[in-house]
Image (cartoon, helix red, strand yellow):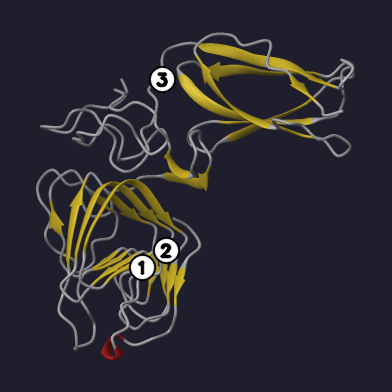
Amino acid sequence: MNGNSAGSGSVNSGFVGGGGIGNGGATVNISNSTISGNSSGCNCGGGGIATIFGGVTNLRNVTIANNNASAGPGGGIISSLPVSGAALGTTNLSNTIVADNTATANPDVNGSIVSQGYNLVRTRGTSTGYVASDQPDGADPKLGPLANYGGPTETHSLESSSAAIDQGNSTLMTDQRGFMRPIDNPSFSNAPGGNGSDIGAFEALGTTAGAVTVGGRVLTPTGRGIRNVLVTLTDSGGNARTAITSSFGYFSFEDISAGETYIISVSAKRYRFDQPMRVLSVNEDLTGVDFTAQQ
């Protein structure tokens, strides 16, 4: 959920707020979802989610990031109000990330939450309700930019040193992209009592020792190589490498970590491609990654 907004109303006039989701009394269940880039101008805050008027919002393996509350607190989540006039809501968090949001105060969460364990709230502020399995105040999930890392929808990836990797205990079998979870990363120890799932909507792929090569050609419809085409290879942390095709259309990326998923894309001024971007699961050398321009 991205790019939504709530206006500049007042909770005293019955305005719920919540740029991404405004829950004014219902029970809302959300899992394996990303709520990012939303905003609220309501004085109740809640750029990502506002839960008031007795509503209950249950979040499981959700990533809430880069939301903004311009006129109130709780850029990520509002679960109590800075003004009188409405019953409080209840926000239940499980295996959820709330980080990198902005607001007039308490940027990530305003008020109490009910932790069901294994959450990462980067800036707790005055919020309460945490348990021992939650990551400590200030823990950094090191989120990558909102992008397509595979699957039908955009997500925030986890960089390789993220405090969310292997720190969850999720019963969900896949992440938001449909990729299997949990995936154990040998560089991390599981959280006590956890099962090695990552916190949030994104499950980072474990890496294996060794490096491989990814390469191919960019071709015209008649099979001739196209030179000076930009090819970009992006890892699950959002880190990108680029290559320019040779005179005969060849490109190559060396020293690529095996056991990861990458996005490879091609861009040329004079050509269009039916499939300019694809997802690669890299476990060994891939030398036939070709792109053919349209007729």
Give the residue number, with chain letter if any, for mark 3.
207
Query: Where does the C terminus fall, quadrant-wise?
Result: top right
Q: Which residue occupies 31% across, 24% down?
A: 183
| 286 relative position to 97: left or right | right
179 vs 245, nearest the viewer: 179
- Residue 280 position in % (x across, y down): 56, 22
- Residue 167 position in % (x across, y down): 23, 36
215 vs 54, nearest the viewer: 54
Where residue 164 sits, quadrant-wise, is top left
178 vs 197, nearest the viewer: 178
Where residue 19 sits, quadrant-wise, is bottom left
Q: Secondary structure at mark 1?
A: loop
Q: Whole-Å distance between the Cαs marked 3 and 1?
A: 34 Å
Mark 3 / mark 1, whichever is N-terminal:
1
Give the residue number, with chain letter if any, for mark 1.
75
Identity of the amino acid at label 1? Gly
